């Protein structure tokens, strides 16, 4: 028998959702203040209006739904799935007011793309956008990369059990420190420390490339945020191609790889366990899949003959490949060149890289290399059981921060999430085909959206069908949260309608 959600369930969900919304409203004041400092009065007013709407909405929810109870698992998952949808809508308000989006749906598309660290965009005339709105586009990637709920865990939520239930709902099931609130604060500490280092490096490189100091610092800040949070937004419409700089590309590759690594691995490195990077199943799997997918891409590019010089082939091919594998979405070629210049073999390597993604408990999306490693280990275990005598005891283990024995529940979870992602990739491709796009083009764009990558072959633009925009919004949302909290929300809605 399905039980209908109670009033207490709704109040608890509304109360914690309100807290998260208040956190989002307070963050909107950052670009508002920066807009005043930049002397961009109208853009600053856009964020003041957005912050007022968001704070009022959040305060009303917390007052009407005030609760002292801890979140249950079901409530925590529902809060997470709803918070991302609400954040995308409210975060779109100042964007839409800027006049750089043709419709509010387009602004919501970019807002979800930012929070989900995807990087697909429908923005118009980006090269002439105010600093204030550009800052917000990248700031929401910083928030989304760490996790919207991390804001609440860091600032508002003091209950360790309730905090952990929301933390897990945001596709993070690994605690770095014993307390999940401390874990959230460590994630912010790591991110801010890297933010300073990465911004300085990119700013100096920008100045050496001839940029004005203020622009170099602003671009360095924006590029770092989107690279470390594996997002893909840039201040200019040409993406990283705008800079025409090999040092800039090298630095962004380093930042993208750092962003694709597990925060638990960052903690190990910070505490002196540097050998962990050579032993961890995720880093080993990440390196192997990079080699395999780049080999496929390089063979395809060699066949196409688009880059006659080996260095140029490596530079263009590897950059797009690593950008796709880390889930960042930076490009040093134009979107149309993927299908105008590259052949299907080269694109297959990039699609596979996008589909696999980086590490769990990182800012990247997609299937994740830990799950790939677990599935591979399970296959090895099954092969051993077939080959060895029946009485032989077969135990398979892997190293992930510590030695872990492989269990059936780990394999089942890895297979289910992998299957769910594959279904999501194909579903988006089929919908793209329904709207008249070739299968491979539709698959490329669908994988990019669902894996939270942001590479585009040219399908994503303001003129594409509304149904496809909604499809990609759903894919970005589902891919970022990795399904469980969304399944819980669907179950909650079914219980509300049919429960007793």
Image (cartoon, rainbow, N blue to C red):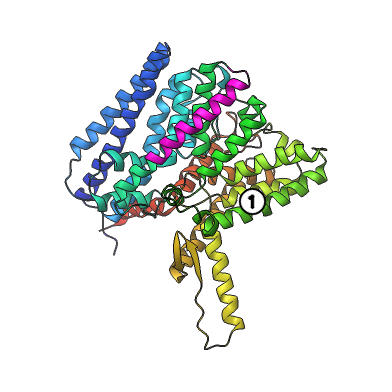
Q: Position of residue 45 (x, y in %)?
A: 37, 16
Give coordinates of residue 192: x percent, y percent. 41, 35
Q: Where's residue 264, x and y in %?
A: 43, 51
Left or right: residue 241 compared with residue 6? right
| Label 1: which secondary element | helix
| Placement of 148 over or under 430, stated as above or below | above
Q: Residue at x 30, y 47 (%)?
A: 182
In this view, 288 is above or below 81: below
Q: How far across and how far down the image is residue 390, in percent?
A: 55, 88
Relative to 298, is 325 on the left or the right? left
Q: Residues within 10 Å of mark 1 (few under 14, many from 20)?
A: many
Q: Quadrant of residue 423?
A: bottom right
Residue appearing at x 40%, y 16% in the figure: 35
Please say whether residue 34 is visible from this viewpoint: yes
- Residue position marked by numbered label 1 in the rendering: 290
Q: Quadrant of residue 460?
A: top right
**Image quarter of the C terminus:** bottom left
Q: Is residue 496 visible?
A: no
The segment highlighted magenta reads: 189-211
Magenta span dominant secondary structure: helix
Total count of labels: 1
The quadrant holding residue 383 is bottom right
Above/below status of 141 relative to 287: above
Q: Pick whichever, 205 or 273, lies toward us.
A: 273
Asked if residue 215 is among those painted magenta in the image, a careful observer would answer: no
Above-or-below relation of 491 to 446: below
Q: Quadrant of the N terminus?
A: bottom left
């Amino acid at each position: 028998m399905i039980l209908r959600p109670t009033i207490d369930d709704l109040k608890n969900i509304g109360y914690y959702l309100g807290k998260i919304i208040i956190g989002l409203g307070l963050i909107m004041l950052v670009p508002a203040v920066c807009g005043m400092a930049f002397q961009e009065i109208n853009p600053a007013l856009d964020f003041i209006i957005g912050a007022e709407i968001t704070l009022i909405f959040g305060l009303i929810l917390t007052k009407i739904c005030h609760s002292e109870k801890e979140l249950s698992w079901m409530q925590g998952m529902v809060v997470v799935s709803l918070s991302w949808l609400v954040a995308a809508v409210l975060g779109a308000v100042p964007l839409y007011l800027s006049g750089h989006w043709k419709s509010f749906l387009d602004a919501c598309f970019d807002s979800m793309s930012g929070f989900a660290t995807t990087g697909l965009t429908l923005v118009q005339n980006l090269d002439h956008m105010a600093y204030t709105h550009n800052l917000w586009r990248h700031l929401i990637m910083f928030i989304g990369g760490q996790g919207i709920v991390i804001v609440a865990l860091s600032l508002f939520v003091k209950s360790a059990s309730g905090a952990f239930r929301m933390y897990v709902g945001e596709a993070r099931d690994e605690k770095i420190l014993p307390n999940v609130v401390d874990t959230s604060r460590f994630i912010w500490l790591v991110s801010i420390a890297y933010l300073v280092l990465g911004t300085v490096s990119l700013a100096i490189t920008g100045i050496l490339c001839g940029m004005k100091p203020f622009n170099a610092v602003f671009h360095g800040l924006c590029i770092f945020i989107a690279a470390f949070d594996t997002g893909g937004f840039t201040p200019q419409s040409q993406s990283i191609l705008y800079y025409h700089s090999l040092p800039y590309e090298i630095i962004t590759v380093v930042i993208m790889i750092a962003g694709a690594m597990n925060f638990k691995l960052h903690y190990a490195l910070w505490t002196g366990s540097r050998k962990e990077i050579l032993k961890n199943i995720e880093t080993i799997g990440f390196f192997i899949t990079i080699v395999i997918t780049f080999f496929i891409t390089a063979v395809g590019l060699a066949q196409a003959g688009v880059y006659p010089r080996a260095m140029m082939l490596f530079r263009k091919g590897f950059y797009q490949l690593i950008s796709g594998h880390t889930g960042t979405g930076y490009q040093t070629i134009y979107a149309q060149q993927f299908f105008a210049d590259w052949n299907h073999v080269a694109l297959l390597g990039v699609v596979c890289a996008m589909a696999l993604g980086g590490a769990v408990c990182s800012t990247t999306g997609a299937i994740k290399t830990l799950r790939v490693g677990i599935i591979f280990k399970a296959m090895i275990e099954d092969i051993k059981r077939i080959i060895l005598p029946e009485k032989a005891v077969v135990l398979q283990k892997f190293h992930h921060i510590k030695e872990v024995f492989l269990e059936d529940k780990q394999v089942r979870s890895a297979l289910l999430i992998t299957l769910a992602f594959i279904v999501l990739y194909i579903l988006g491709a089929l919908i793209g085909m329904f709207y008249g796009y070739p299968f491979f083009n539709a698959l490329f764009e669908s994988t990019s959206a669902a894996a939270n990558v942001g590479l585009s072959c040219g399908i994503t633009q303001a003129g594409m069908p509304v149904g496809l925009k909604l499809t990609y919004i759903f894919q970005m949302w589902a891919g970022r949260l990795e399904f469980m909290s969304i399944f819980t929300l669907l179950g909650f809605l079914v219980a509300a309608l049919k429960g007793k």
